[in-house]
Image (tube, coloured by chain):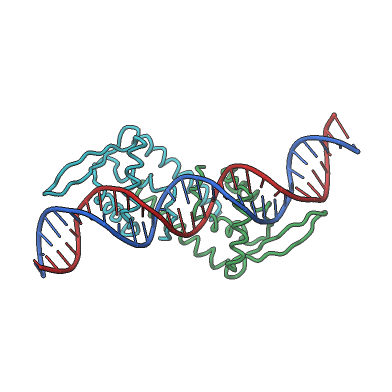
Chain colours: A green, B cyan, C red, D blue
DNA sequence: TCCTATACGTAGCGCGACTACATGTAGCGG
DNA sequence: CCGCTACATGTAGTCGCGCTACGTATAGGA
């Protein structure tokens, strides 16, 4: 997929993939690739800073855990994150309606 | 609508609104606003440079005409522009499928 | 006469995803 | 046991592009 089309929708993707489960950064990248049939292959330089940004915003919470000698920072949605996800989903629907309405009337 | 979500889709909008008709810049802005029920209100500083960029890319052609003392630069799709529009529409469908698939599985 | 709508355009900013790099462990094949 | 790959996290700097904020100018109505 063309780079940069994601712009403005990355937060929604990250929140959505964490809906109902806890995942660490690397697993988030894999989960997004899986859910999109390989269409989404986000670089770590995109995902990790975004996760920290979402945590600073209060939408995610993280904790360290160690699995077989490897440290992982596991993220989960906060309650505010749940609400943010709902808002992002609503905005996504509006966005597709508006643009789609122009592109294929 | 949140600013910047448009990023990467502006070209598609401009090509789509010129599909099958000739319009000048100001009319393009109005047409987009109309087709989106007012959701799209693009500033001239966004549209005019984009039109020139699309013309440089060979997707649009323009000519000056004067209507009641006002000069207008009227744009129309080139054949390459038609093909580009088809490609943009295909990419839009793929984009919505991918992101939508992640957001609401 | 002044204000609004029409009409085109440029300069510069800022945001956010990207590229490229840095660091380190676990496990496997040879 | 050595090197390679997968796993895992992170930072620094770049760059494209839509936006803000201007500047210019005419037509027409209040």
What residue is rendered at 35% in x and 59% in y?
A: B39
Left or right relative to A71: residue B42: left
Is B100 in front, or is C13? C13
Q: Is A90 placed left or right of B73 in the picture?
A: right
Q: Residue drawn at (65%, 63%), measured in percent from left and top?
A: A76
- Percent position (x, y) of residue A85? 54, 63
Q: Position of residue A27 (x, y in %)?
A: 68, 52
Closer to us: B68 or B83? B68
Q: Nearer the viewer, residue A87 or B50?
A: B50
A18 sits left or right of B7 in the view: right
Residue at 51% in and 55% down: A9
Q: Please tell me whether residue A3 is drawn above or below residue A91 in the rendered image.
A: above
Task: Give x and y (percent) for residue A46.
Answer: 59, 51
In the picture, the quarter occupied by the N terminus of chain B is: bottom left
Count of numbered tags = 0
Q: Position of residue A34 (x, y in %)?
A: 62, 47
């Amino acid at each position: 997929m063309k780079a940069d089309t994601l712009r403005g929708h990355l937060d929604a993707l990250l929140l959505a993939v964490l809906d109902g489960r806890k995942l660490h950064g690397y697993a988030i990248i894999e989960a997004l690739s899986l859910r999109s049939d390989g269409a989404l292959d986000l670089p770590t330089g995109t995902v990790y800073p975004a996760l920290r940004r979402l945590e600073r915003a209060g939408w995610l919470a993280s904790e360290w855990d160690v699995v077989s000698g490897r440290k992982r920072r596991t993220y989960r949605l906060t309650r505010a994150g749940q609400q943010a996800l709902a808002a992002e989903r609503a905005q996504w629907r509006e966005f597709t309606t508006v643009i789609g309405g122009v592109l294929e009337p």
